[in-house]
Amino acid sequence: MARTFNGSTQFLRRAEALSITYPLTLALWVYPQRSNLYEDVLCLARSADNSTGWFLQLRGPDGMKAAAVTAYQNTFAIARSSTTFALNRWCHLAGVFTGASSRMVYLDGVAGSVEGTGLAVPTVDRILIGAWERQGSWMAYFAGYTAEAAVWKVALNAREIAQLASGNSPLLVRPADLVAYWPLGGPFGNDDRDH
């Protein structure tokens, strides 16, 4: 079981003050069903400035790559995966943001290169799954399924990302540093309440 997104109108949004800063990790399972310009699958963003935050994306024109993105007032630093995703197949995404000038994306446990553009620290007040809200409009809708979305207040290491990509529950990987977890109907739970 997983949460389904239709790619045109469906998304999840939770708005609240979030005291999240570096380091942090975002991760989830996705089953993409199309390849658009880009589709946002998990975002931490700021409502007052929709081009600020941390994002996990799937990017079709980049050669079917996953991306971990830091954005600050319309400036984007994008770490791309070294491997590619396939449509109609489950894959695991993780973005590790160790500091203002260091971000890396993992696709199925395989690390991409570190992207080192320095940006100011985003301040965020909402969590989005399945789309991106920009200046009051929704865009970058995801088409497919998601499950096991999670956010940690630490930079998980390669071994821990590999554990997640092999199917371990986020509840078993640095649980003391797990700040948000949504099973989304995944194998480790059947509801969408916060951890």
Image (cartoon, rainbow, N blue to C red):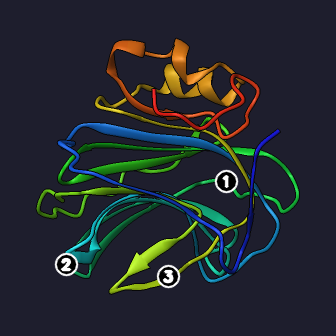
Is 119 situated above or below 172? below
What crowding class fits label 2: few (fewer than 14 Cα within 10 Å), some (14-19), or many (20 or more)? Answer: some
Q: Earlier in the sequence, mark 1 or mark 2?
A: 2
Relative horizontal placement of residue 73, taking residue 31 as reference (left or right): left
Residue sitting at x 37%, y 85%: 136
Relative horizontal placement of residue 94, taking residue 75 as reference (left or right): right
Give amino acid for label 2: Gln
Q: Which mark is residue 73?
A: 2
Q: Which mark is residue 83?
A: 1
Rounded to the nearest angstrom, the CA distance separating label 1 from label 3 is 28 Å
What crowding class fits label 1: few (fewer than 14 Cα within 10 Å), some (14-19), or many (20 or more)? Answer: some
Give the residue number, with chain letter if any, for mark 3: 138
Rounded to the nearest angstrom, the CA distance separating label 2 from label 3 is 17 Å
Q: Nearer the viewer, mark 2 or mark 3?
A: 3
Figure quadrant of residue 179 = top left
Is 137 situated above or below 67? below
Is 192 situated above or below 187? below
On the image, the x and y values in percent for residue 170 come to 55, 23
Q: Earlier in the sequence, mark 2 or mark 3?
A: 2
Between 116 and 195, the one lying in front of the other is: 195
Is 167 situated above or below 107? above
